[in-house]
Image (spheres, grey):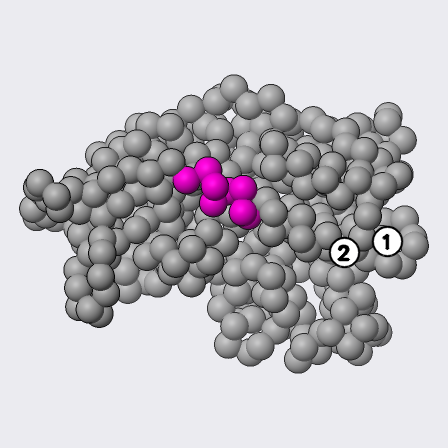
Amino acid sequence: MGKYFGTDGFRGEAGVALTADHAYKIGRFLGWYYNNLRKQENKEGKAKIVIGKDTRLSSYMFEYVLAGGIVSSGADAYLLHVTTTPCVAYVTRTDEFDCGIMISASHNPYYDNGIKLINSKGEKMEDETIELIEKYLDSAENIAFSTRDEIGKSVDYVSGRNRYLGYLISLGMYSLKGKRIGIDSANGSSWNLARNVFETLGAKVYQIGAEPDGTNINADIGSTHIEKLQQFVKENHLDCGFAFDGDADRCICVDENGNVVDGDGILYIYGRYMKERGKLVSNTVVTTVMSNFGLYKAFDELGINYAKTDVGDKYVYEYMMKNGCRLGGEQSGHIIFSKYASTGDGILTSLKIMEVIMAEKKTL
């Protein structure tokens, strides 16, 4: 934990704890740092940094300020615009960017915002690089501005977001025709993506939290206010429902009776599904110290081993990579399927739960 960056980025009230000046200096440093790194590694061309954002009013400010800092240091900034954190991670990894930036404060209210940094592998940024950024933020040092043809460019990169959408659809193992699915997008990043994925797979989608106005993200809606989706599923007699947070890296489920299935429930359902099919590599599910003791008793009955990490999907993922685990997550709904993603992905999680429902021919 640094002075500015915690386990999930630099987060605070926009204009107070996290300012445009902070964002500009971060962009300036990242552009300079990755250009220098490329030169040291004898790589041709300018550094490329991809940026995504959620629907907060201040996200637009931070997007352009970060891009300005990046290009003025001689790197190129690629803009995904409104998209999810897992989308930025996917695009950074598959399109060979030097790093990725997600502008979001996740489940926090609209007046907060955050800057999440992602390395070239699509993983949370290394602590060593974060320390260098923090040192620069607190210094009076000035990075030289690029001039002439060394100045970077800003590129509209909606095509990257569309490829991520196609990737999610490709992971749908079954047609969802005839299924009535509720989605709560928290007026955040997934407001359009999630509907597209499920409708393409044939489901009838009923949606709330899909009218972002810049100030209503997570406002009494989304995965931290699950009661809205519970009521919505029951009133509309839906098969199930999925609630995401502001940047859609977490998912909480609601069954056909309005009962909540949290991250522990998701880990149990999919862990058992993988175990029965011989796909639970290492026979271990990774959890955090916040998981319910009942989950461990249930795993014991199934003969599934489990590990406990500190709270934070960063620590879950690090353990999974070190020990070759395929499934891990948090009670809050950050679920990581390491075969398919390098971070928690709410839409992917909902697709995986639908896979179990269709394969088992059971209700949630």
> Looking at the image, which is closer to me, 142 or 140?
142
Q: Residue at 74% of width from left, 36% of height from top?
A: 199
Dot 1: what SS?
A: helix
Q: Residue furthest right?
A: 361
Q: Position of residue 238 (x, y in %)?
A: 86, 34
The answer to whether residue 307 is above or below residue 198 is: below
**Residue designated by label 2:** 173
The residue carrying mark 1 is 358
Instruction: Indicate the quadrant where residue 183 lies.
Output: top right
Q: Position of residue 73 (x, y in %)?
A: 16, 45
Left or right: where does residue 260 sit relative to residue 178? left
Rendered-image quadrant of the N terminus: bottom left
Position of residue 185 measured from the top left corner of the image (x, y, whole percent): 63, 33
Residue 273 locus on image (x, y percent): 80, 66
Q: Is residue 20 visible?
A: yes
Magenta residues span 157-164
Q: Upstream in the sequence, badge 1 or badge 2?
A: 2
Q: Is residue 318 above or below residue 125?
A: below
- The disc at residue 161 is none
**Is residue 240 left or right of 128 when viewed as pictured?**
right
Which quadrant of the structure image shows residue 259? top right
Callout 2 amino acid:
Met
173 drawn magenta = no
Within 10 Å of disc 1 (Cα), the crowding (few <14, some 14-19, many 20+) is some
Residue lying at 92% horizontally and 54% vertically, measured from the top left = 361
- Residue 28 shows in the view: no
Residue at 8% x, 41% y is: 147
Q: CA distance from mark 1 to mark 2?
A: 9 Å
Where disc 2 sits, the SS reads: loop
Q: Main secondary structure of the magenta part?
A: helix
